[in-house]
Image: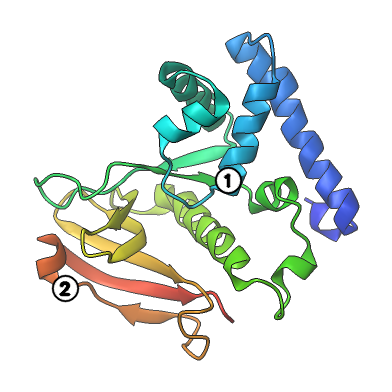
Amino acid sequence: PGIHTLPPRVRQRRYRAYVDTIVDRDVSDLLRVRKNEPFRRLVEQLAARTAQELNLQELGSMLAVQRPTLDAWLDVLRRLSLVQRLPAWTPGETGRDISNAKYHFVDTGVVAALRGMTEATFAPTAQPSALGPLLETAVHGELAKNLPHQEESWRLYHWRTSRGYEIDVLADDGDGHAVHDRILGPAANPCRPVIEVVTVEPAESGQRFGHGVEHPAGR
């Protein structure tokens, strides 16, 4: 709980030690892997790709592991509560616009540590694109934590149409209703309000949408 009060370098070491414990102890016990290095590389690649659509074929080739092995490793990381899988959404009974799921880390501090991010990474003069994926992951995490407290049985997805319209987090109650969340990068429009209510045109989805919320990341 007090990790956020630690000096940056100490905090990064603490997070990395946490990942090392998962890889060296928990993963070895569950999978009985002989060499942990490929699995460690997977965790690092997931950190670099948090909030992005994950091409498992490409990732498996990069790690030199077969698809069944990669699926098993990802399942273990989910069972250990290190990452969460966000599947693509299917509008109604039609086919999916995309099929690749996104993977979000449960703790954005782990992502920042594995990617060597510090306070300077998010300074006003720094590269603005660094904040977007972390903000999207943080928003997804808060929404996921609140699902058990809702009366309806909501499930989370992401969605991108063939026209390029993208919803970062979409909640569907399975009864023809959906609400959505868009996280906008700083370059989109830094003058926009922090939270803005938006809607999706019904023709885009064939689904009845409720209101959604946009979170510009530039403020």
Look at label 1 and name its amino acid: Val
Image quadrant assignment for residue 208: bottom left
What kind of element bears circle 2?
A: loop
Name the side, left or right, on which 170 lies relative to 141: left
Name the side, left or right, on which 170 lies relative to 5: left
Q: Which residue is mark 2?
A: 201
List x then y, in percent, for residue 186.
Answer: 54, 77
Image quadrant assignment for residue 36: top right
- First in sequence: mark 1 or mark 2? 1
Name the residue located 54 percent from the left edge and 31 percent from the top edge.
Answer: 62
List x then y, in percent, for residue 159.
Answer: 29, 55
Does the image show residue 40? yes
Q: Is residue 60 above or below residue 155?
A: above
Cα distance in 3D space between marks 1 and 2? 31 Å
Q: Which mark is residue 106?
A: 1
What kind of element bears circle 1?
A: loop
Q: Residues within 10 Å of mark 2 (few under 14, many from 20)?
A: few
Does the image show residue 2? no
Name the residue located 48 percent from the left edge and 26 percent from the top edge.
Answer: 75
Q: Nearer the viewer, mark 1 or mark 2?
A: 2
Q: Residues within 10 Å of mark 1 (few under 14, many from 20)?
A: many
Name the residue located 72 percent from the left edge and 45 percent from the top edge.
Answer: 114
Quarter occupied by the C terminus: bottom right
List x then y, in percent, for residue 50.
Answer: 54, 49
Image quadrant assignment for residue 121: bottom right
Look at label 2 and name its amino acid: Glu
List x then y, in percent, for residue 214.
Answer: 40, 74
Figure coloring? rainbow
Name the side, left or right, on which 196 lies relative to 50: left
Name the residue located 32 percent from the left edge and 71 percent from the top edge.
Answer: 212
Q: Is residue 120 above or below residue 103?
A: below
